[in-house]
Image (cartoon, rainbow, N blue to C red):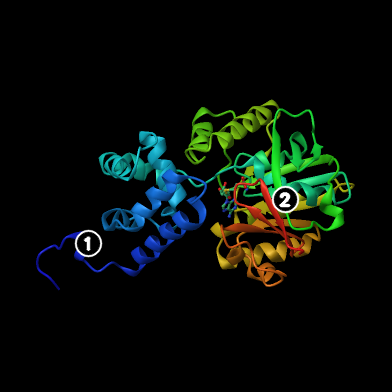
């Protein structure tokens, strides 16, 4: 063991710092590239910066995510101009940024993810009872309040102030190809920490979770928040496994109950996921999942083809059967069928 402290770059990096560095490298190359040049640079910088990795190593493992660090830094100090600016802000305001990371969660609520849900919802018997687990502020609980365009096919609430555009690749199965209207008889969400569309701090956090440069996403979020404020979707606080049965029992029996989740099970332990699968099976409802391949391996095992290699996409599945790959922030669907 050396007696003297060594410069950080000469010290062996602990295994979990290697894992964090790899996570930031992957985020930079697969998620941020092509979507946010600033986040691509910042996360590549973190991946190569032993001191920032050491700072992250002091946080609980579930608080080391790129999106959480980047949003907390911007929430406290504004959007940096580049890596050096980001790093200075991080160490100058370390306590406030760490406090924000510990107090907040990555709760990106992206209404454009409804572009993937919508064709599947429209193919189910109407009216629908929507139950979203991990609903954040509930903006994906309002798929009937948005308009959609899939190429030349415009559908949904065509007079809505929010028009969600979706690029479609591959051949959709006929029942999903030109989705018609949906009717929602009931809706409810569950979240560990519901965000309130009428609370200015929650709205500021939601805005900060949108990546820099993505002005379209920001406008979309603001329009969806305005719509949600007119009649906020009910989202109850709690763990998805604790509240699912109780909430599902409130759905009107004449409606088709569909439980769905996007970008949620990544945060749930293996045991939690197994309990969730069991509950879904017992409810005998429909289920739409929009999660990355590694999160639901039994769904991924049924994929008839590999996902596009250029970017990370969710696997969109209905009742455990993969139907398409969907872009992480919505707006692109690649159907699994050739
Ligand atoms: C990345 S956000 C996605 C929000 C929304 N589904 C969307 O796609 O816009 C994940 C959400 O899942 C929630 N969450 C994570 N684990 C949960 C659990 N065990 N029970 C309920 N909600 C959970 C988080 O609080 C967060 O709001």
According to the picture, the residue beneath numbered tag 2 turns out to be 168
- Kindly state the secondary structure of the residue where label 2 is placed: strand
According to the picture, the residue beneath numbered tag 1 turns out to be 9
Task: Find out whether the residues at labels 1 and 2 contact each other: C-beta distance under 8 Å.
Answer: no
Residue at the (85%, 40%) spot, across then down: 181
Q: Which quadrant would residue 271 be assigned to in this image?
A: bottom right
* Label 2 Cα crowd, 10 Å radius (few <14 / some 14-19 / many 20+): some
Vertically, is 18 above or below 69? below
Per the model, the C-alpha gap separating discs 1 and 2 is 46 Å
Residue 24 lies left or right of residue 271; in this view the side is left
Residue 251 appears in the figure: no
Is ligand 1 within 8 Å of the beta carbon of the residue shown at mark 2?
Answer: no
Query: Looking at the rendering, in which quadrant would you find the N terminus?
Result: bottom left
Residue 319 lies left or right of residue 202; in this view the side is right
Residue 294 lies left or right of residue 147; in this view the side is left
- Kindly state the secondary structure of the residue where label 1 is placed: helix
Vertically, is 75 above or below 19? above
Query: Looking at the rendering, in which quadrant would you find the C terminus?
Result: bottom right
Vertically, is 245 above or below 303? above
Q: In x, y percent, where is residue 145?
A: 75, 34
Residue at the (68%, 72%) spot, across then down: 301
Q: In x, y percent, where is residue 250?
A: 78, 46
Q: Mark 2 or mark 1, which is nearer the start of the sequence?
A: 1
Vertically, is 124 above or below 228? below
Residue 29 appears in the figure: yes
């Amino acid at each position: 063991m050396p007696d003297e402290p060594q410069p950080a770059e000469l010290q062996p990096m602990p295994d979990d710092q290697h894992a964090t560095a790899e996570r930031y490298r992957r985020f930079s190359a697969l998620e941020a590239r092509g979507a946010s040049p600033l986040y691509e640079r910042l996360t590549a910088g973190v991946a190569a910066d032993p001191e920032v990795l050491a700072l992250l190593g002091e946080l609980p493992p579930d608080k080391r995510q790129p999106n959480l660090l980047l949003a907390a830094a911007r929430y406290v100090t504004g959007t940096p101009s580049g890596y050096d600016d980001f790093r200075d802000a991080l160490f100058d305001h370390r306590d406030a940024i760490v406090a924000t990371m510990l107090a907040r969660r990555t709760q990106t609520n992206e209404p454009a993810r409804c572009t993937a849900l919508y064709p599947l919802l429209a193919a189910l018997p109407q009216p629908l009872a929507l139950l979203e687990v991990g609903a954040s502020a509930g903006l994906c609980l309002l798929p009937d309040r948005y308009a959609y365009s899939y190429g030349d096919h415009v559908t949904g609430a065509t007079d809505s102030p929010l028009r969600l555009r979706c690029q479609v690749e591959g051949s959709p199965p006929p029942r999903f190809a030109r989705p018609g209207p949906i009717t929602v008889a009931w809706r409810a969400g569950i979240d560990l920490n519901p965000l309130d569309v009428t609370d200015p701090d929650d709205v500021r956090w939601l805005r900060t979770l949108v990546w820099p440069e993505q002005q379209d996403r920001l406008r979309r979020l603001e329009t969806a928040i305005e719509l949600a404020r007119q009649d906020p979707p009910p989202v109850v606080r709690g763990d998805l496994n604790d509240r699912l049965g109780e909430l599902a029992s409130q759905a009107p029996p004449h409606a088709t109950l569909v439980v769905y989740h996007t970008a949620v099970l990544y945060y749930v332990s293996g045991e939690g996921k197994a309990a969730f699968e069991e509950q879904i099976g017992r409810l005998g409802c429909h289920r739409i999942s929009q999660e990355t391949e590694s999160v639901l391996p039994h769904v991924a095992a049924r994929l008839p083809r590999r996902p596009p290699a250029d970017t990370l996409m969710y696997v969109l599945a209905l009742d455990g059967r993969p139907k398409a790959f969907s872009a992480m922030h919505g707006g692109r669907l690649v159907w699994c069928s050739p």
